[in-house]
Image: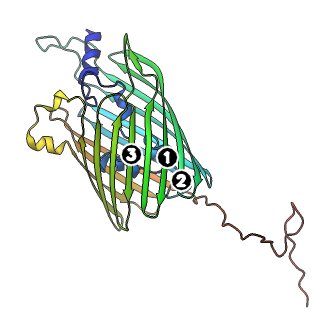
Amino acid sequence: MKKRFIAAVLFLSPLGLGAKTPGAAFLAVDPSVRAESLGGISAAAFGAEALGANPALVTPTHGRSEFYATFSQLWGDTTDGHVAFATGLDPKTAMALSARFMASDPAGGRDASGQPTGADTSARHTTVAGALSRKLARGLRVGAAGRFFESTLAGESSGVGWSVDAGVSYVVKDVLLSAAVNQLGPGIQYIHQSDPLPSVLRLETSWEPGAVTFLAGYHRSLAGAGSEAALGFEYRWRSLSLRAGLRTSLGGADNLALDAQSTADGLLDHFTTGFGLKLGENLRLDYAFQQSAPEWGSDHSLALAWSWGEILRSPAPRPAGFKPKNPGKAGTPNKRPKLTK
Protein backbone atom coordinates (compact mmCIF):
# COMPACT_ATOMS: atom_id res chain seq x y z
CA MET A 1 0.00 0.00 0.00
CA LYS A 2 2.74 2.43 0.99
CA LYS A 3 4.78 1.74 -2.14
CA ARG A 4 1.73 2.20 -4.37
CA PHE A 5 1.01 5.54 -2.68
CA ILE A 6 4.56 6.79 -3.25
CA ALA A 7 4.38 5.76 -6.90
CA ALA A 8 1.11 7.67 -7.27
CA VAL A 9 2.59 10.78 -5.63
CA LEU A 10 5.58 10.69 -7.96
CA PHE A 11 3.29 10.36 -10.97
CA LEU A 12 0.62 12.89 -9.99
CA SER A 13 2.78 15.47 -8.23
CA PRO A 14 1.34 18.97 -8.84
CA LEU A 15 4.81 20.13 -9.85
CA GLY A 16 5.36 17.32 -12.29
CA LEU A 17 4.42 17.09 -15.95
CA GLY A 18 4.02 13.36 -16.45
CA ALA A 19 5.41 9.88 -15.82
CA LYS A 20 8.81 10.70 -17.34
CA THR A 21 9.35 13.91 -15.42
CA PRO A 22 12.15 14.38 -12.87
CA GLY A 23 11.72 13.73 -9.17
CA ALA A 24 12.40 16.12 -6.26
CA ALA A 25 9.89 18.56 -7.73
CA PHE A 26 9.93 20.52 -4.45
CA LEU A 27 13.36 21.83 -5.48
CA ALA A 28 11.79 23.61 -8.46
CA VAL A 29 9.61 25.90 -6.31
CA ASP A 30 11.03 29.43 -6.63
CA PRO A 31 11.92 30.94 -3.23
CA SER A 32 11.38 34.52 -4.48
CA VAL A 33 7.83 35.81 -4.03
CA ARG A 34 8.60 38.79 -6.28
CA ALA A 35 9.78 36.46 -9.05
CA GLU A 36 6.72 34.24 -8.58
CA SER A 37 4.38 37.19 -9.15
CA LEU A 38 6.33 38.14 -12.30
CA GLY A 39 5.82 34.89 -14.18
CA GLY A 40 8.53 32.99 -12.33
CA ILE A 41 11.32 35.11 -13.84
CA SER A 42 14.21 34.94 -11.36
CA ALA A 43 15.99 37.97 -12.86
CA ALA A 44 13.63 39.87 -10.53
CA ALA A 45 15.27 38.30 -7.46
CA PHE A 46 18.23 40.00 -5.76
CA GLY A 47 19.99 39.45 -2.46
CA ALA A 48 18.83 36.67 -0.16
CA GLU A 49 15.83 35.78 -2.33
CA ALA A 50 18.11 34.95 -5.30
CA LEU A 51 19.51 31.86 -3.54
CA GLY A 52 17.71 29.06 -5.36
CA ALA A 53 17.61 30.91 -8.69
CA ASN A 54 20.68 32.78 -10.03
CA PRO A 55 23.46 32.74 -7.38
CA ALA A 56 25.26 35.59 -9.18
CA LEU A 57 22.50 37.91 -7.94
CA VAL A 58 22.75 37.19 -4.19
CA THR A 59 24.47 40.53 -3.54
CA PRO A 60 22.06 42.67 -1.44
CA THR A 61 20.93 45.82 -3.27
CA HIS A 62 19.35 47.81 -0.38
CA GLY A 63 22.01 47.40 2.30
CA ARG A 64 25.11 45.44 3.22
CA SER A 65 23.03 42.59 4.70
CA GLU A 66 19.54 41.25 4.18
CA PHE A 67 17.18 38.81 5.91
CA TYR A 68 14.40 37.24 3.85
CA ALA A 69 11.51 35.06 5.06
CA THR A 70 8.58 33.58 3.13
CA PHE A 71 5.46 31.59 3.87
CA SER A 72 3.36 29.96 1.14
CA GLN A 73 0.13 27.97 1.05
CA LEU A 74 0.35 25.71 -2.00
CA TRP A 75 -2.38 23.48 -3.47
CA GLY A 76 -4.60 23.69 -0.42
CA ASP A 77 -2.82 21.22 1.88
CA THR A 78 0.86 22.11 1.37
CA THR A 79 2.74 24.73 3.39
CA ASP A 80 6.18 26.08 2.53
CA GLY A 81 8.45 28.07 4.85
CA HIS A 82 11.77 29.58 3.79
CA VAL A 83 14.36 31.83 5.46
CA ALA A 84 17.53 33.26 3.92
CA PHE A 85 20.36 35.63 4.80
CA ALA A 86 22.75 37.45 2.46
CA THR A 87 25.62 39.84 3.15
CA GLY A 88 28.46 41.56 1.36
CA LEU A 89 31.89 40.28 2.42
CA ASP A 90 33.79 42.98 0.52
CA PRO A 91 32.96 45.35 -2.36
CA LYS A 92 33.18 42.47 -4.87
CA THR A 93 32.02 39.40 -2.94
CA ALA A 94 28.75 38.37 -1.32
CA MET A 95 27.47 35.21 0.34
CA ALA A 96 24.04 33.80 1.22
CA LEU A 97 22.60 31.00 3.35
CA SER A 98 19.07 29.57 3.40
CA ALA A 99 16.87 26.87 4.94
CA ARG A 100 13.52 25.59 3.74
CA PHE A 101 10.82 23.25 5.01
CA MET A 102 7.82 22.06 2.98
CA ALA A 103 5.07 19.82 4.34
CA SER A 104 1.91 18.26 2.93
CA ASP A 105 -0.77 16.69 5.15
CA PRO A 106 -3.57 15.20 3.04
CA ALA A 107 -6.53 13.33 4.52
CA GLY A 108 -4.61 10.06 4.87
CA GLY A 109 -4.94 6.65 3.26
CA ARG A 110 -8.41 5.29 2.45
CA ASP A 111 -9.70 1.98 1.13
CA ALA A 112 -11.98 1.38 -1.88
CA SER A 113 -15.07 2.31 0.16
CA GLY A 114 -13.52 5.59 1.33
CA GLN A 115 -12.87 4.47 4.88
CA PRO A 116 -9.63 5.60 6.59
CA THR A 117 -6.91 2.95 6.68
CA GLY A 118 -4.50 4.75 8.99
CA ALA A 119 -1.80 4.75 6.30
CA ASP A 120 0.69 7.62 6.37
CA THR A 121 0.30 9.78 3.24
CA SER A 122 2.20 12.86 4.41
CA ALA A 123 5.20 14.43 2.69
CA ARG A 124 8.11 16.37 4.20
CA HIS A 125 10.95 18.13 2.37
CA THR A 126 13.91 19.92 3.99
CA THR A 127 16.61 21.92 2.20
CA VAL A 128 19.66 23.92 3.33
CA ALA A 129 21.78 25.91 0.88
CA GLY A 130 24.68 28.34 0.55
CA ALA A 131 25.99 30.56 -2.25
CA LEU A 132 28.87 32.85 -3.19
CA SER A 133 28.80 35.68 -5.72
CA ARG A 134 31.81 37.54 -7.15
CA LYS A 135 32.16 40.65 -9.30
CA LEU A 136 34.60 40.05 -12.17
CA ALA A 137 34.30 43.33 -14.06
CA ARG A 138 32.05 46.36 -14.30
CA GLY A 139 28.49 45.00 -14.48
CA LEU A 140 29.63 41.35 -14.63
CA ARG A 141 29.08 38.89 -11.77
CA VAL A 142 29.31 35.11 -11.40
CA GLY A 143 27.98 32.89 -8.65
CA ALA A 144 27.74 29.30 -7.46
CA ALA A 145 25.49 27.59 -4.91
CA GLY A 146 25.16 24.18 -3.32
CA ARG A 147 22.43 22.54 -1.26
CA PHE A 148 21.64 19.44 0.74
CA PHE A 149 18.10 18.09 0.87
CA GLU A 150 16.08 15.26 2.39
CA SER A 151 12.58 14.19 1.41
CA THR A 152 10.11 11.84 3.08
CA LEU A 153 7.00 10.44 1.36
CA ALA A 154 4.61 8.25 3.34
CA GLY A 155 7.32 7.56 5.88
CA GLU A 156 9.93 6.56 3.29
CA SER A 157 13.03 8.78 3.24
CA SER A 158 15.10 9.61 0.18
CA GLY A 159 18.19 10.01 2.32
CA VAL A 160 20.37 13.10 2.05
CA GLY A 161 20.92 14.31 -1.51
CA TRP A 162 22.72 17.28 -3.00
CA SER A 163 22.63 19.61 -5.99
CA VAL A 164 24.50 22.66 -7.27
CA ASP A 165 23.66 25.86 -9.17
CA ALA A 166 25.79 28.22 -11.25
CA GLY A 167 24.96 31.60 -12.72
CA VAL A 168 26.21 34.73 -14.42
CA SER A 169 24.71 38.21 -14.72
CA TYR A 170 25.62 41.30 -16.69
CA VAL A 171 24.21 44.81 -16.30
CA VAL A 172 24.51 47.46 -18.99
CA LYS A 173 22.66 50.73 -18.35
CA ASP A 174 19.05 49.75 -17.50
CA VAL A 175 19.25 46.18 -18.83
CA LEU A 176 20.07 43.04 -16.85
CA LEU A 177 21.06 39.81 -18.62
CA SER A 178 20.89 36.66 -16.49
CA ALA A 179 21.80 33.02 -17.17
CA ALA A 180 21.79 30.16 -14.66
CA VAL A 181 21.63 26.39 -14.39
CA ASN A 182 19.86 24.97 -11.34
CA GLN A 183 19.57 21.61 -9.60
CA LEU A 184 22.52 19.78 -11.13
CA GLY A 185 23.09 16.58 -9.16
CA PRO A 186 22.94 12.77 -9.10
CA GLY A 187 19.17 12.46 -8.52
CA ILE A 188 16.81 11.30 -5.78
CA GLN A 189 15.65 7.81 -4.77
CA TYR A 190 12.65 6.48 -2.85
CA ILE A 191 12.80 2.74 -2.07
CA HIS A 192 14.03 1.31 -5.40
CA GLN A 193 12.90 4.10 -7.75
CA SER A 194 15.53 6.63 -8.77
CA ASP A 195 14.67 9.84 -10.63
CA PRO A 196 16.74 12.73 -12.02
CA LEU A 197 16.58 16.15 -10.39
CA PRO A 198 14.52 18.95 -12.02
CA SER A 199 17.60 20.54 -13.63
CA VAL A 200 16.81 23.66 -15.61
CA LEU A 201 18.55 26.29 -17.74
CA ARG A 202 17.29 29.85 -17.18
CA LEU A 203 17.90 32.60 -19.74
CA GLU A 204 16.32 35.86 -18.62
CA THR A 205 16.46 39.61 -19.03
CA SER A 206 14.93 42.69 -17.44
CA TRP A 207 14.72 46.33 -18.53
CA GLU A 208 14.07 49.06 -15.97
CA PRO A 209 13.43 52.45 -17.61
CA GLY A 210 12.38 54.44 -14.57
CA ALA A 211 9.32 53.43 -12.55
CA VAL A 212 8.54 50.30 -14.59
CA THR A 213 10.32 47.00 -15.17
CA PHE A 214 9.79 44.68 -18.14
CA LEU A 215 11.01 41.08 -17.87
CA ALA A 216 11.27 38.08 -20.20
CA GLY A 217 12.52 34.57 -19.58
CA TYR A 218 13.08 31.20 -21.24
CA HIS A 219 13.41 28.11 -19.04
CA ARG A 220 14.59 24.81 -20.55
CA SER A 221 14.42 21.55 -18.61
CA LEU A 222 17.70 19.64 -18.78
CA ALA A 223 15.92 16.42 -17.78
CA GLY A 224 13.54 16.20 -20.73
CA ALA A 225 10.49 17.86 -19.15
CA GLY A 226 10.04 20.52 -21.85
CA SER A 227 10.46 24.28 -21.63
CA GLU A 228 8.49 27.43 -20.90
CA ALA A 229 8.51 31.12 -21.74
CA ALA A 230 7.48 33.93 -19.41
CA LEU A 231 6.84 37.67 -19.44
CA GLY A 232 6.60 40.00 -16.45
CA PHE A 233 5.72 43.61 -15.73
CA GLU A 234 6.11 45.76 -12.61
CA TYR A 235 4.95 49.32 -11.99
CA ARG A 236 6.19 51.27 -8.95
CA TRP A 237 4.32 54.19 -7.43
CA ARG A 238 5.69 55.63 -4.19
CA SER A 239 5.84 52.71 -1.73
CA LEU A 240 3.67 50.36 -3.82
CA SER A 241 4.75 47.99 -6.60
CA LEU A 242 2.11 46.29 -8.79
CA ARG A 243 3.17 43.11 -10.57
CA ALA A 244 1.84 40.71 -13.19
CA GLY A 245 3.27 37.83 -15.18
CA LEU A 246 2.40 35.37 -17.92
CA ARG A 247 3.98 31.96 -18.42
CA THR A 248 3.30 29.22 -20.96
CA SER A 249 4.65 25.77 -21.76
CA LEU A 250 6.58 25.33 -25.01
CA GLY A 251 6.57 21.53 -24.99
CA GLY A 252 6.93 18.50 -22.79
CA ALA A 253 4.58 15.93 -21.31
CA ASP A 254 1.04 17.04 -20.45
CA ASN A 255 -0.18 17.25 -16.87
CA LEU A 256 -3.32 15.08 -16.88
CA ALA A 257 -4.61 16.79 -13.73
CA LEU A 258 -5.23 19.96 -15.78
CA ASP A 259 -7.46 18.30 -18.40
CA ALA A 260 -10.67 18.81 -16.38
CA GLN A 261 -10.25 22.58 -16.22
CA SER A 262 -12.58 25.08 -17.83
CA THR A 263 -11.27 27.50 -20.43
CA ALA A 264 -11.22 30.32 -17.86
CA ASP A 265 -9.29 28.22 -15.34
CA GLY A 266 -6.89 27.17 -18.09
CA LEU A 267 -6.13 30.82 -18.84
CA LEU A 268 -5.67 31.62 -15.15
CA ASP A 269 -3.08 28.84 -14.90
CA HIS A 270 -0.77 30.96 -17.06
CA PHE A 271 -1.30 34.20 -15.14
CA THR A 272 0.52 35.37 -12.00
CA THR A 273 0.11 38.55 -10.04
CA GLY A 274 1.08 40.23 -6.78
CA PHE A 275 2.37 43.38 -5.18
CA GLY A 276 5.21 44.78 -3.09
CA LEU A 277 4.94 47.33 -0.30
CA LYS A 278 7.81 49.26 1.26
CA LEU A 279 7.36 49.61 5.02
CA GLY A 280 9.94 52.28 5.69
CA GLU A 281 13.46 52.51 4.31
CA ASN A 282 14.64 48.98 5.08
CA LEU A 283 11.53 46.76 5.21
CA ARG A 284 9.54 45.31 2.30
CA LEU A 285 6.44 43.10 2.11
CA ASP A 286 5.75 40.98 -1.00
CA TYR A 287 2.66 38.98 -1.99
CA ALA A 288 2.10 36.63 -4.94
CA PHE A 289 -0.96 34.76 -6.25
CA GLN A 290 -1.17 31.96 -8.79
CA GLN A 291 -4.08 29.71 -9.80
CA SER A 292 -3.56 25.93 -9.86
CA ALA A 293 -5.78 23.08 -11.05
CA PRO A 294 -9.30 23.28 -9.49
CA GLU A 295 -8.75 20.39 -7.08
CA TRP A 296 -5.53 21.98 -5.78
CA GLY A 297 -6.83 25.52 -5.33
CA SER A 298 -4.80 28.72 -5.47
CA ASP A 299 -1.23 29.42 -4.38
CA HIS A 300 -0.67 32.32 -1.98
CA SER A 301 2.80 33.48 -0.93
CA LEU A 302 4.00 36.18 1.47
CA ALA A 303 7.54 37.44 2.01
CA LEU A 304 9.23 39.90 4.32
CA ALA A 305 12.64 41.38 3.45
CA TRP A 306 14.69 43.41 5.93
CA SER A 307 17.98 45.07 4.95
CA TRP A 308 20.52 46.96 7.06
CA GLY A 309 24.05 48.36 6.92
CA GLU A 310 25.85 50.47 4.36
CA ILE A 311 26.52 48.88 0.97
CA LEU A 312 30.23 48.14 0.52
CA ARG A 313 31.67 50.05 -2.42
CA SER A 314 35.07 49.95 -4.07
CA PRO A 315 37.22 53.07 -3.47
CA ALA A 316 37.27 55.58 -6.29
CA PRO A 317 40.20 55.02 -8.70
CA ARG A 318 43.12 57.46 -8.38
CA PRO A 319 44.84 59.10 -11.35
CA ALA A 320 48.18 57.66 -12.43
CA GLY A 321 51.07 59.21 -10.50
CA PHE A 322 48.80 60.46 -7.72
CA LYS A 323 50.59 61.09 -4.40
CA PRO A 324 49.02 62.36 -1.17
CA LYS A 325 50.32 65.75 -0.01
CA ASN A 326 51.30 64.47 3.42
CA PRO A 327 51.73 60.68 3.28
CA GLY A 328 53.53 60.43 6.65
CA LYS A 329 55.51 57.35 7.54
CA ALA A 330 54.37 53.96 6.34
CA GLY A 331 52.15 52.24 8.87
CA THR A 332 51.65 55.40 10.99
CA PRO A 333 48.90 58.02 10.88
CA ASN A 334 49.61 61.32 9.17
CA LYS A 335 50.71 64.13 11.51
CA ARG A 336 48.80 67.37 11.58
CA PRO A 337 50.93 70.54 11.06
CA LYS A 338 51.58 72.61 14.17
CA LEU A 339 49.52 75.73 14.55
CA THR A 340 51.49 79.01 14.78
CA LYS A 341 50.40 82.15 16.52
Q: Position of residue 36 (x, y in %)?
A: 32, 46
Tell me the CA gap for discs 2 and 1: 7 Å
Is 256 situated above or below 86?
A: above
In the picture, residue 155 is in which quadrant?
Answer: top left
The residue depicted at 34 percent of the width and 25 percent of the height is 22
Q: Is residue 59 left or right of residue 313?
A: left
In the picture, residue 25 is in which quadrant?
Answer: top left
Q: Position of residue 327 (x, y in %)?
A: 85, 70
Q: Is residue 85 left or right of residue 237?
A: right
Q: Which mark, residue 203?
A: 3
Q: Which of pointers 2 and 1 lies earlier in the amino acid sequence?
A: 2
Q: Residues within 10 Å of mark 2 (few under 14, many from 20)?
A: some
Is 35 situated above or below 328?
A: above
Q: Position of residue 296 (x, y in %)?
A: 20, 33
Quick one: which residue is furthest to the bottom in this view?
341
The residue depicted at 51 percent of the width and 44 percent of the height is 85
Assign the C terminus to one quadrant of the image: bottom right
Viewer-nearest residue: 180 or 101: 180
The residue that disc 1 covers is: 168
Tell me the CA gap for discs 3 and 1: 10 Å
Verify CB contact (< 8 Å) between mark 2 and mark 1.
yes
SS at mark 2?
strand
The residue depicted at 17 percent of the width and 35 percent of the height is 293
The disc labelled 2 sits on which kind of residue? Leu
Q: Which mark, residue 51?
A: none
Q: Position of residue 190 (x, y in %)?
A: 37, 15
The residue that disc 2 covers is: 140
Q: Which of pointers 3 and 2 lies earlier in the amino acid sequence?
A: 2
The disc labelled 1 sits on which kind of residue? Val
